[in-house]
Image (cartoon, coloured by chain):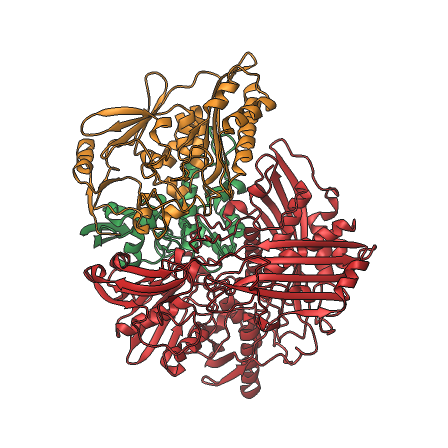
Amino acid sequence: MIPFEYRRAEDTDSAVAAVEEAPRAVFLAGGTNLVDHLKLGITAPEELVDVTALPLDTIESTPDGGLRIGATVRNSDLAASPPVRERYRALSLALLSGASAQLRNRATTGGNLLQRTRCPYFQEVTTPCNKRSPGTGCSALHGHNKNHAVLGASDSCVATHPSDMAVAMAALDGTVHVRSSRDERTIPVTELHRLPGEQPHRDTVLERGELITAVDLPPLPEGTYTAYRKVRERASYAFALVSVAAVLRVANGVIDDVRLAFGGLAHKPWRAGTAEERLRGAIPEEATFREAAEAELSVARPLADNAFKIPLARNTLGAVLRDLTTEVLR
Amino acid sequence: MERPVTLHVDGTARKLSVDTRTTLLDALREQLAVTASKKGCDHGQCGACTVLLDGRRVLACLVLAVTCDRSEVTTADGLGGSGSPHPVQRALLEHDGLQCGYCTPGQACSAVGMLDEAKAGWPSAVTEDPRQNVELTEDEIRERMSGNLCRCGAYPNIVAALREAIR
Amino acid sequence: MTQDVGSGAVGSPVERLDGQAKVTGNAPYAFEQLTEGAVYLHPLRAPVARGRVTEMDTSAAEAVGGVRAILLAGQVEQLDTRDRELAVLQSREVAFRGQYVGAVLATTPENARHAASLVRVSCAASPPDVALEGDRADLYAPEVVNPRFGTDTEQGDTDSAFEEAAYFIDRTYRTPMEHNNPMEPHATVAHWDGGELSLYDSTQGAHSVRATLAPLFGLPTDRVRVQAPHVGGGFGSKGLPHANVVLAALAARSVPGTPVKFAVTRQQIFTVAGHRTPTIQRIRLGATRSGELTAITHDVVEHTSRIKEFAEQTAVPTRNMYRAANRRTTHRLAALDVPVPSWMRAPGECPGMFALESAVDEMARECGQDPVEFRIRNEPSEDPETGLPFSSHNLATCLRRGAEGFGWYDRNAPARSSPDAAGWIPGVGVAASTYPVFRSPGSRALVLAEGSGRYRVSIGAVDIGTGARTALTQIAADALGTEVSAIDLRIADTALPYANVAGGSSGTTCWGTAIHEAAGKLRAEHGSAPLPGASAEGETTSNPESGRFAMHAYGAQFAEVRVHADTGEVRVPRMLGVFAVGRVINPRTARSQFLGGMTMGLSMALHEEAVLDHELGHVVNQDLAEYHIATNADVGAIEITWLDEQDPHVNPMGSKGIGEIGIVGTAAAVANAVQHATGVRVRQLPITPDKLIS
């Protein structure tokens, strides 16, 4: 850990200016990922700009009936907040199935979105890793890759994104608000994270100095149900092998609205557009769920140790939709 | 790069100068000789360093001390106030919810934080209906305490102790 | 043997004597000593798995503020040892990735870590060989297996017996490399002062650390003092001193007068603190039509490191667990570019009984017999290997009582039930546990009368969380005919009389016997009300009855599982363990030992697996986020009971060891239950969703 300066930002303008001006400054929020990485030597910033005192810690209803979630809202507060529990159950569940209570008490909305992969080669600085040290190669491609990507990976990087929250936000059509010294812009959650391609060191489309300030969730129409299911190797406190976030609305016996996202399968939350297309307008039944999942996963490309993720993802998606349908029809 | 901070540790104001890189855990253990918070992994993966920071349970190994200026830090040593153990600690003793004792102070702090979270109505991943208030069943306690690993395997005794502490 | 005076202390559920200090965080562990003026050690580690260090550039590191010393491999004082694990920094050869090749000492932990990261270590590397396979051409037979069992055994003619058998199975089971991972990482505070070395160390044996380190540094043992006031678990990994202790002492000698603090990081634990070898175990069983075993073979392949041999005694329990006229057990090793394996809770029994108890379950099904009844039917009446009678043998009672308590006979006989509404399929399984009664001679205890009915009892034993502090106090109280509160027990210091390592589930036997002897002598020489200052010393000898009896503890474990039909997730909502372990000294802490063993066994069954990268040679999942140990949510209800077993032959207390037997058999009980639920037999641990998904 190289010595670094610490600055507590008092307002958003000065925070973004500070990071923009200093080439090796980074934002510090909850620290649950960054402090870990400082110790491991994955990153070596010269300045930390603490954004936790900025006025970005509120959860507010938007005029259209949606929700605006501040970037520094702690994960535990978000999971417990009444509007999230009542209207966006998948998000509450996703948050609660991530990490542990202690970590959720620190981790923030923005930090959770920007957390980096748990690929163990990425974390061990003496091994080749294109994400950590571009051009050195990918150790996981032919190494131990049980927890790695089956969708959208490249030969440069087969890492997965570890967030649960982001998977739920992707299914809920969330929008990320981003601020720089020049402008403000919005990015759909589904477009925030990149696929690795030839530049796996870039996790997201954010530019240097851009700060996430909030995430908006659009309102869910009456009769819409949501769910989040995480499959992992321990009953708690473990990253997903596969997770599924689902939004479902059934009208007149057919699927009227469906939005699905997978976690644990790709370098980003994987919005399952192909499956959604197959399901929209269909009668909600087991065979259809399976067919839709298989269509989505037909482009999956397993590595030596992770072929199991494909049937696991198919089955988990099927189970989530089956349970949601039961709930809808109740 | 050193910075002065004041930490209110177990009810006592402590002024110290910290390297910006120093974690709250190392500041407590190495600079203040407050060793109730334990270092088990130093990376947020075991829970042994759990303390209450301004009343919330957090992992001291992932918090930089420089960010804690003027904060209240409660370790297992300060949970009960004035020298006597907290009811949660007393219950852990009675149910032998410990063996080597290394995860135990973190378990105690975590449990106290957990009880407050439940009192505030926070759901967990196993709460049947997150819209309802929670009852701390055994399954709820297990899930909520899963951020504190115990290699000696005292979990069933910890759960029994916390069930009693709730009553 | 002498009899206890019997104050009733032994057998009562005394609350853990150091409990209050532990729950409030006031019990001091090794790293929490001598902080004033100390310097911090951060090690340099080999970035390759095989080769040699060619260059170490320290210029950038030296410029970091507060750096006091930098030690480099090949440039330190010579240590007197042939043990290449402990020959720390003696050469620049690299035998495994992550091996210590240097160290930085600095006045703060931040600067030590930072400076260490700036040392550029260059190596000449060749591709490592870390993959264990059963058909490697270089497998060899070690001279003995841990601790000194014969490598192979053969009785009768197994080949003919298999040919004649009505039922025959031939199965291969695998267990992965596993790491002990006590919650307290290995830590040492080392201090050289005037030619004397003092250590606070997180160890299972203060005296064994001293006995190892003193000759290494060319010192008489009385110039070395080791203290281990509280130890945050060990499970075998702190049983033998590892390279970290030597490195701390070596570094301390470079800054005499200044304490050096060295806590091994969690990541480093995966390479320098021992591990359980992976095993490949082929088991063949033959049985008659009526379900009597006629032949058993158990052939084990495992790894060791290239620089030091450790041969886990995996097939040893198969030598006396079941009756069969024809039997063969073998152990073969591959010496690889891997870290040095060592003890992990119940070495031998733990992985070996996973395979044997899975195979026995498979054979019971083959024979169409109930797995509980099948085991009882095949119980030996004497030790099949030596012909000696058992000092006590109550496995059948454990199985029967367990079956009753668990509701075993109410289960669905056929495997593969259908899932419930939430998708979970139930199943139950059983397995037997066993662990030998070990007793090493040499532990000594001193009992001193302090007047007013109080006694000071001194022995250099350690309490690594077992409850030894409490149990030994109870034994002393009983032997002295007084109350627990009248005993002032002093442990955990080499300034106190010699005590064996806390290992082999023999601590209470070795230390308790010495205390018992000392107390007996004090009473014999000074009566029941000795004057202040009267004292007596006792020593544990070899058990005079060990040549006349086979001595083992037994148990039966039952597990209920649920397997999710869609995802292959496994949950274990309920377990029951019934044990026959002689006399239980403290029911409260003993129950915790069994719970802990079974919990670790459950963790082994479902979670634990260290993965070696075949090209880079390191443990890929080298932290607690990726190397999973059971969390609270993974552990359901566990019920523990034990028999009221009398065994006058094992030691004066009549107690057998309890620290390890709890982990033996658990994984098989879970695997057998998973088979019952799903019809899928998982022969390779851990039982993770990928092995059950379809």
Chain C display color: red
The image position of residue C207, as x and y in percent, is: 45, 75
Q: Which chain is orange?
A: A
Residue C380 in view: no
Q: Is residue C602 left or right of residue C124?
A: right
Q: How many marks?
A: 0
The quarter of the picture where the C terminus of chain C appears is: top right
Quick one: which residue is furthest to the right in this view? C289
Q: Is residue C422 left or right of residue A78?
A: right
Q: Which chain is green?
A: B
Query: Is C171 located above or below residue C70 in the figure?
Result: above
Q: Residue at horizontal 27%, vertical 48%?
A: B64
Of the pair C276 and C338, the residue shown nearer to us: C338
The quarter of the picture where the N terminus of chain C appears is: bottom right
Of the pair B131 and C181, the residue shown nearer to us: C181
Residue C10 in view: yes
Quick one: which residue is furthest to the top in this view? A252
Query: Is A202 located above or below residue C28 in the figure?
Result: above
Of the pair B128 and B40, the residue shown nearer to us: B40
Q: Residue at horizontal 40%, vertical 55%?
A: C267
Q: Is residue C649 left or right of residue A282?
A: right
Q: Is residue C207 left or right of residue A1?
A: right
